[in-house]
Amino acid sequence: MRLTLCSAVAMIAIAACQTTPVPVHLTDAEFAELVTSAKAEWHPFITIEEYSAALDTATLTDEQRARLLFERGKIRRLERINIPGAIEDFEAAKLLVTDTELRSSLEAELAFAVSDLEQVRARLSGLQTLSDWFVDTVAIGDYEAVAERIRASGLSPSVEQARFLEAAGYICRGVEDAPSKDFTLGEDVSHLDGVNWCETPAES
């Protein structure tokens, strides 16, 4: 009876091993295509979102995950879109990376990001124009604040501000009452034709 029971347990264990799905990681070509496709998006914010989706859903090797965290962190820092998030990306990637060249790049980018964030916070603590405040507030990742302040100001967002707000899901095209009556104050508001504040802003 003991032998039969042991045999049954062994058979169940073997069957479990045989039926457990083996993760299928992205091939090098698939990973390269993912990065290339994300970089081709019309705004850096969308590129960041594409990287985030891949990090959440794709089956990646540790090296691929480290590389993707590096790419997301780099574009966050360079485009000044959530520098604290960039710092988190670089720190997370350092825990995974084995490639010495990538590790060196990560350490350099991390140092730059920490310095950039210190400068941004120093500027935010003083007086700023609305335009400069917008840039620095996006840089610390407070997208909701920039959308609320632009809307409350009564001023039309600039071309770059409007592109960011659209990419982040705060202003939309093809909605009713477009262009918005809010978008009337400014020297040139032609870039705001056909857009309005989204009824349900995207969650940032």
Image (cartoon, grey):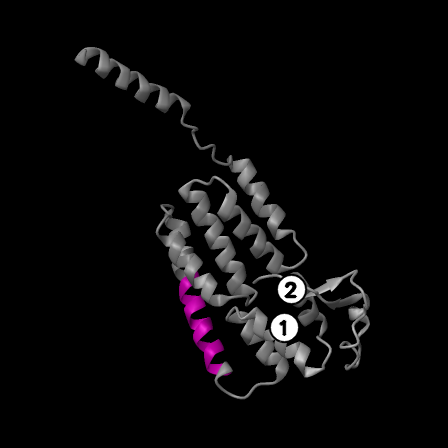
Instruction: Give, as a three-letter code, the residue at label 1.
Output: Ala
> For the residues carrying marks 1 and 2, which lies nearer the camera in this image?
2
**Residue at the image position 78 percent from the left and 70 percent from the top:** 192
- Residue 112 at x, y = what percent? 44, 67
Instruction: Give, as a three-letter code, the residue at label 2.
Output: Pro
On-image quarter of the N terminus: top left
Q: Secondary structure at mark 2?
A: loop
Q: Is residue 204 left or right of residue 21?
A: right
**In the foreground, 5 or 188:** 5
**In the foreground, 200 or 65:** 200
Q: Quick check: is 120 in the magenta stretch?
A: yes
Q: Secondary structure at mark 1?
A: helix
Q: Is residue 179 above or below residue 129?
A: above
Q: Is residue 77 above or below residue 25?
A: below
**In the foreground, 81 or 204:** 204
> Which residue is the site of mark 2?
201
Q: Is residue 11 above or below residue 191?
A: above
Q: Which residues are magenta?
A: 109-123
**Residue at the image position 44 percent from the left and 33 percent from the top:** 23
Q: Is residue 20 left or right of residue 169?
A: left
